[in-house]
Amino acid sequence: MRGRTVLAAVVALAVVAGLAGFAGYALGRGDRAGGPVPPAAEGPGDADLVLASALQPFDDCDGLLAWYRDNALEQVGPYGLDGGYGTAVSGAAASTDAAVGRAGAAAEEGLTAEAAAPADAAAPVGPSATGTNVQEAGVDEPDVVKTDGERAFVAAAGALQVVDVGDGDPRVVGSVDLPDGDHELLLDGDRVLVLGRRYGAVVPFALEERSAPAAQGPVSVLTLVDVADPAAPAILRSVELDGDYRSARLADGTVRIVVDTPPTALPFVAPEVGGLRAEREATQRNREVVRAATLEDWLPWAVTTDADGRTVDEGPLLDCDQVRRPPAFAGLSTLSVLSVDLAAGLELGGGTGVVARGETVYASPDTLYVGTTTWDPEGRAATSTDLHAFDLSDPRAAPYRGSGSVAGRLLNQYALSEHEGHLRVAVTEEGDGDEPSQSAVVVLAAEGGQLVEVGRAGGLGLTETIRSVRFLGDLGVVVTFRQTDPLYTLDLSDPRDPRVAGELKITGYSAYLHPVGDGRLLGVGQDATEDGTITGVQASLFDVSDPAAPARLDQVTFGQGSAAVEWDPRAFLYWPDTALAVVPVELWSPPTEQAPPGREPVEELPIGQGFAGAVGLRVTGDGLEETARISHDPVAAPGSAPAPGSSPALGSPADPIRRALVVGDVLYTVGSASIRAADLDDLEPRGLAAFE
């Protein structure tokens, strides 16, 4: 799978590691936990930062195979590699001495100082050109719906739905079936890249030989669709890859795709009966499996099919000279970051990889970062986060720039932000019996090929954990929560001396923060009592124009339930031209009586009936005003009967709203089964179209 020129790939993640016990193969945590975290120290460059050496290539294919074999022999047991799920050991045990002076020429240049800066608190932030709420201007993120201003493309009902949204009356004009699984989209001109994953069944014990049962790991599925003719969207090419698609970014026509692949092709066995003897015999047989494995058994496998579904290429995604490793063992998974030119097609073959895990993906216009959290031996507490930077200035390649490791764990991608040559990282350090949990914002810079700590603001939210983060130029905003909600503002203008500028303590917390202009942030999360008991979904308007004196200007509560933006920021829409925010919610009880003094609670729902739809909020100077509730189902109207397919107990409609986007003067809300239009000014409903 080489010799192609369209795809260039880079690699992301080298986890600096020490051996320890298994913590589970799950998104958001390392496969294995590492050794003890170095004790905290004072000031920049303290022991909370562990430098990681540059990724190192293998001498040849024999060297790569020997590396897999030797490390797997140390890990394999009676049920294979941790029961067949693959294994990774990660920690914070690399030495600073080993890290210095090993970076390549590209890393020596350091992080670019010309990356587009994040928005500041004075400017409102709207969606991307394709309608998605994204973290960085100019860097599009995959989503379940995309628009070009005339058409909307929706991954729904097992198909790519093409909807005419040019005149305010939505009409499904074409569709094409997609492979089974979850899907999200990226749009570039007349081409849509569908990114997804599917999961296989658990392999049962064989009758003639007791093989170890193991879940067939996720398979990433990439599908390129030509949508030049909206009535007849056509699949051009599909690629299936071993591994879990983590995320992707699109900038200037180039897509970067991150895939994490545990070993899945080894025919391990399990004990045929109980007892120590059977376990020892199974372990010995599994060691023989490891010794007999070839490189193709370890590397990710890729299968490419054409428009007619015929296989046109098949084989390892990576060649051995494309794989690198960290200096310390970081697991047997393979992380690949692929770069695809959508205009040229979906060609695979130029990639590189690293034998390690990857979880959190963040990209500025010029730099890709991948981070992984490592855990203690019991898998109960995060110990550190390893971060690796890659240059995206060349659409055909992304040279490795540097690595670092910071004590604590990330909340999500919004905990990372590149600004004027520095990476700001918000982390929560878990507490133990002697020390409480606390959070910090750490500033890193590339020096000598490493991400080196140059500044730190620590001691945030003692006994609490981070619930949301927003970096806005030289301003940082961090929300922590356990019982109350300390909202911290940070002055980051001097990266070597970041400081806490102000603090606001209120009940509840915001799980997402969005700039709405004039130093205002709109927060969405959960209200709570003084003792930390959650009482329901809330929206808050904060004034952070004076970082030394942050204030909450207004609050609206909606009742017990959840808002999708609490875990997926792409579910949020803010349209600056009309100061309108649209928040999908699911509520299952009447609103609480926690309305602010002088405000009436929002209209109550009948007892036992819920609401699943979206709430429209307008920012009116220093206040928030609920303007309408939108639903795709008549059950949303108070007093109406539940619709077919809904839950009679909660009254939840069969088609809850997932996303909202604006085209012209029309607001479109998108569910799993339909798309609805409403007037942007008053949110009065217009047309509705069901997906095919």
Image: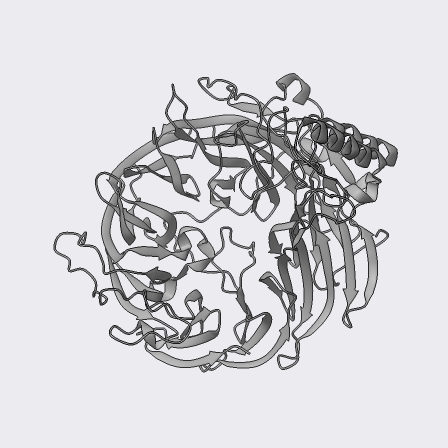
Instruction: Please report the residue visible at 74 percent of the width from the left and 63 percent of the height from the top.
Output: 345
Q: Residue at the location (68% across, 60% down)?
A: 222
Relative to 673, residue 454 above or below = above
Give the left or right position of residue 532, taking residue 563 as reference: left
Residue 316, x across and y down, in percent: 80, 49
Residue at 63%, 30% in the rendered image: 89
Up the image or down, 122 lies above or below 616; here it is: above
Above or below for 29 versus 631: above
Q: Tell me which residue sits at (47%, 47%) in the image.
A: 118
Relative side of 121 to 559, left or right? right
Residue 287 placed where, x, y %? 78, 31
Picture quadrant of residue 486: top left
- Residue in the foreground of this view, choosing between 212 and 433: 212
Q: For this rendering, which residue is in front, 226 or 535? A: 535
Q: Where is residue 550? Give x, y as percent.
A: 27, 41
436 to 313, vertically: above or below: above
Quarter the C terminus occupies:
bottom right
Q: So how many labels did they put on this image? A: 0
**Front-most of residues 465 and 298:** 298
Please name the colour scheme applied to the rendered image: one colour
Report x, y in % for residue 570.
Answer: 47, 57
**Does residue 32 appear in this view?**
yes
Q: Note whether residue 104 is visible.
A: no
- Dividing the picture into quadrants, the one containing residue 193 is bottom right
Residue 180 quadrant = bottom right
